[in-house]
Image (cartoon, rainbow, N blue to C red):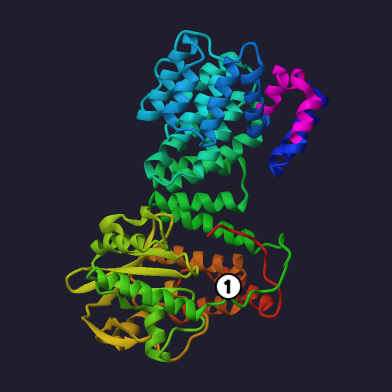
Amino acid sequence: MTNPFHTDWLRRFREDLRVGDMDSLTQNVELAGLDVLLDPEFLALACQEDARSVVVLIATLGDANSEQPEPYRRWLAGYQYLQQQLGLDEAAQLCAASGSSEAGYYAAVLDAARNRSPLTNLGSAPVHVTDLQFGLELLVNTGNSAAIPPLLKAWQGVDHSDMPWLRACRAAAARSGKVHARNEAAELAKTIQWLLTKAPSAQAAVAQEMRVQCAELALKSRQGQLACQAAQDAFAHDTHVERRFTLAKAFVLAGDLPKAISHLHELLMHTLSDAFTPEGPVNSETGSPFDVLAAEDTLVAVNRLLRAKGLQPFLMSGTLLGYARHGGLLPHDKDVDLGLIGWEHQFTVAEALLEAGHFRLDLAQLSGQNRFLMSVNDLRNGMAVDFFLFHDQGDHFLHGIDFDMGFTQNFRFSKFALQETEFLGERFYVPADIDRNLSENYGDWRTPASSYVVTVESPALCDTPESRTFLVYLEVLKTITKRMKPQRMVRILDHLDASHSDVLSHDVRQRLRAWCQQHIAKPALAVEVPA
C-alpha cells in the first residue's frame, strides 16, 4: 500500500520542480530529510508515476550522500540521457562505471541501441529494475523497438506485477508520435502486437489504447495487411466511429475498396441516426478566413525559389481560376495551387524549399513516380501550397490527389504547353490554352459555383466505379462531420442526380436530402470523424 506521506512529498517536489521554485524545493528537501528521499519505496513511487525530475533529484542526492551510491549513479545517468542532457557514449560510461556486475548488461543494451541489432545476451548477473527500465526506454528512443521482447521478459522475471508491461507500453506510445520513417513505424507496430499478446487481463483499457496505436502505426507504415489486422483487432474491442473509420482506411490501403465502402456506409448511417442531437451552428466556412495577402506572398516566394532551380511551376486549379476569372487570387480559396510537368521534379522542389528554411515538408511524400501531389506549409504565415505533379502519359497528362490512406484519385488533362504571363508584379507560367485547361477541370469555369466539390464534379476525373463511390462517401461524411454548409451536400446530390449516377442508393439520397432540409437553417450534427 502506498505511504500517504510519500505521496504528499512527491506532490510537493514535483510542483517545486515544475515552477522552478528552488527556495521551496530546498526547504522541502530539508524537511523531508534523506531518510525519506533515499527510501527505496519513495524512489519506486516516483518511478511508477514517471516523475522524472524527482528521480533525477533523488539520484543526485543519493550519489552524493548514500553509502552505496552506484545504483543512484545508474538512475542519474539513465534519466539524464533520457532528458537529452548526455550523449549516448557518455551515458554508457557512467552506467557501466557502477561495477563489473552490470557492465555486460549495459554493453549488450548499448550495442543494440547503437547498431539496431538484436538483443541476444543480457548478461548472467542479476539486473536491477533500474537498469531494465533504462534499457527499455533507451531501445525505444533509439528506434530499436524490436529488441524489447527479451528485455521485457527479463524484467518480468524480476517484477511479477503489471508494471514492466505498462512501462513498455508507455515507452512505445511515446515513441509512436515521433516516428516518421515507414520501416520504423512497421517495426514499432509489430512490437506493440507482441506486447498485446502479453497484456495482463487487468489492463484492458491500456491494451485497447495500444491496439489503436498499433493500427495507426500500421497505416503510417503503409502495410495494408498489417493495418487491416490491427484495425480489425481494435474494432473488435471498441466499435466507436473512429475505430470504424480507421478500419475503412486500412481496407483502402490493402486495396479492398468494397469493404472500405461498406464501413463508410455503416459510418454514414450511424452519423445520420436519431442517436445524435444537433449541437452548435453550421459553419459557413471551415478553418480560418483565407488571407489573400499571405497567399500572394507565399506564391511569389515559391515561384522565385523554383524558377531559380530551373523549374517551370505554373498556376493551376483554384489559383489559375482566380487569375483567369478575377485577375487575382480567389478570396474564398484555401491554399495556393501550382503544377509541374514531370514527377521527378518533386526532389528539386523539396531541395529548394528546405534550403529556404521556412517551409515544412513531410519527406515521406517523396515517393518517386507514385507521387502526384506534394503539400507543404509556409511557416511564416501558415499558408498551404499544393504542388500537382503532371505525369506525361504520351497522349495526355495525368495528375492526382494522394490521400493519406494510400489512395490516389486521378485527373486526366489534354497535353498543353506553357507560356509566361505577368501576375502580382512577377513572371509566372500558365497553360497556353487556359480555357481548355479550366474547362476540363471545372466545366463552366466562368460562372462562379458556390460549394464546388472537385473530387466529385470535375470533368477531368477518371475514377473507377468503386473509387468514385468511395470518394462520394468520403465527401458526404466530410460535409456532415466537419459541419460544413448543407448547400455543399445539396450540390453533391444534385450532381449525382444530373449525371444519373447510381453511386448512392435511393434510400441514402432521401435521408441525405432530409438532412439538408433539417440543417439549412439549423445546427449541424456534432460528430467527429478523423480526416
Q: For this rendering, which residue is in front, 47 or 88? A: 88
Q: Is residue 298 magenta?
A: no
Q: What is the three-letter code of the residue carrying label 1?
A: Ser
Residue 280 on image: x %, y %: 72, 69
Quadrant (top left, top right, bottom left, bottom right) of the N terminus: top right
Q: Would residue 171 be seen by someone viewing this image from the given angle?
A: yes
Q: Would residue 333 be seen by someone viewing this image from the given angle?
A: no
Residue 72 placement, left or right of 136: right
Q: For this rendering, which residue is in front, 271 or 14? A: 14
Residue at point 43%, 13% (across, down): 104
Circle 1 residue = 288
Residue at point 77%, 22% (across, down): 33
Residue at point 45%, 62% (across, down): 470
Residue 44 placement, left or right of 91: right
Position of residue 320 relative to residue 219, above or below, is below
Residue 42 on image: x %, y %: 72, 22
Q: For this rendering, which residue is in front, 254 or 309? A: 309
Residue at point 28%, 87% (across, down): 421
Residue 269 placement, left or right of 23: left
Position of residue 443 relative to residue 5, above or below, is below
Q: How many marks?
A: 1
**What SS does tag 1 mark?**
loop
Residue 407 on image: x %, y %: 39, 58
Determine the image quadrant of residue 36.
top right
Determine the image quadrant of residue 207.
top right
Q: Which residues are magenta?
A: 25-47
